[in-house]
Image: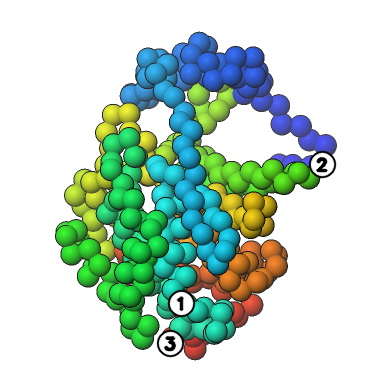
Amino acid sequence: SKWKAGDRLVLPDLARTLQRIADHGAEGFYRGETAERLAAEMQSGDGLITVADLAHYQAKLRPAIHGTYRGYDVYGPSPPSSGGICLVEMLNVLGHFDLRQRDRYSAQNLHLIAETMKRVYCDRARFLGDQDFVQIPKRLTDKSYARKLAEQIDERAATPSETLAPEIDVKDESPSTTHFSVIDKDGLAVSNTTTLHYSWGSRIVVKDAGFLLNNIMNDFNWFPGHTDRSGNIGTTPNQIAPGKRMLSSQTPTIVAYKGRPVLITGSPGGRTIINTSLQMVLNVIEFEMDLPDAMRAARIHHQWLPDRIVYETYGGQITDDTAAE
């Protein structure tokens, strides 16, 4: 039946798991009773994670990716999230075009943004993965490299996606992520994205522990060497290896001006997350929208392959004529 005001959801198994974490910190999850229950669940389903794996796991703090755009500082996550590098690279490219001289949803602006997305997602497939396993080119966030990409964009015609990475052999062919942004009275800001990957993750609850197992292994390139026009990517940097962390699209972002945060943003949406965050930054910084309008605004998405633009419109902001053009 439907939930009513005053109904209570009681989860005693989860409560006990959270209490162990509260009492013992990370040790309360990766060792002891919770770890043993997780490993037992894995064993019952022919999974691979053991008590020893959990004991050896360490969360890593990594410095944020930093870039600048129109005098603002932009901060995003570092690999294995692809969001920070891709966002900064996109903004660096778009900084070479005067987007303000045209309407926000003019065909020309949408073309430039899509061509930028296309090139950066191509670099994502070529180079990005867990930096403990892959050497990521530093040039990706350099302004000089962005200038070269901007010069490659034909302002009157779309570049076929496959021509951007001739070395990659191209074959023929969820409502699960949550983001929140908070700021306190002193200006301390947090941009946080969390996910189970698919809705309900792997749909398995650890017995007597009360939490779901995620399905994030799908973020690896799990058909090595198989890249096709439908968007399956099989490039080397993000292929599965023991101890390796999978590439994600999470893009929790903080934009600051003279040391003070002016925008805290991020999004759910799988591979569309990076492009959504890009357009939030553009809407607020480039086109001076207030936050509600920036959030409701129409968006476009290009991820290199498949070679097509997907758009979602709000109130007819992207007209049929513009889409056709």
Q: Name the residue under label 3.
A: 325
Asked whether the beta carbons under mark 1 and mark 2 sit within 8 Å of each other, the answer is no
First in sequence: mark 1 vs mark 2: 2
Marks 1 and 2, how far apart in space?
52 Å
**Residue 22 position within the rendered picture, expressed as x and y whole percent measured from the top left:** 65, 19
Q: Is residue 196 left or right of residue 42?
A: right
Residue placed furthest toward the right: 6
Residue placed furthest toward the front: 258
Q: Nearer the viewer, mark 1 or mark 2?
A: 1
Q: Name the residue under label 2.
A: 5
Write the residue at 64% across / 43% down: 190
Q: Mark 1 points at which residue?
A: 97
Is residue 100 visible from the viewing direction of this image?
A: yes
Disc 2 residue type? Ala
Marks 2 and 3, how far apart in space?
50 Å
Q: Which type of secondary structure does the marked residue at label 2 adopt?
A: loop
In the figure, residue 169 lies in which quadrant?
Answer: bottom left
Write the residue at 50% across / 79% down: 98
Which image quarter is the N terminus in?
top right
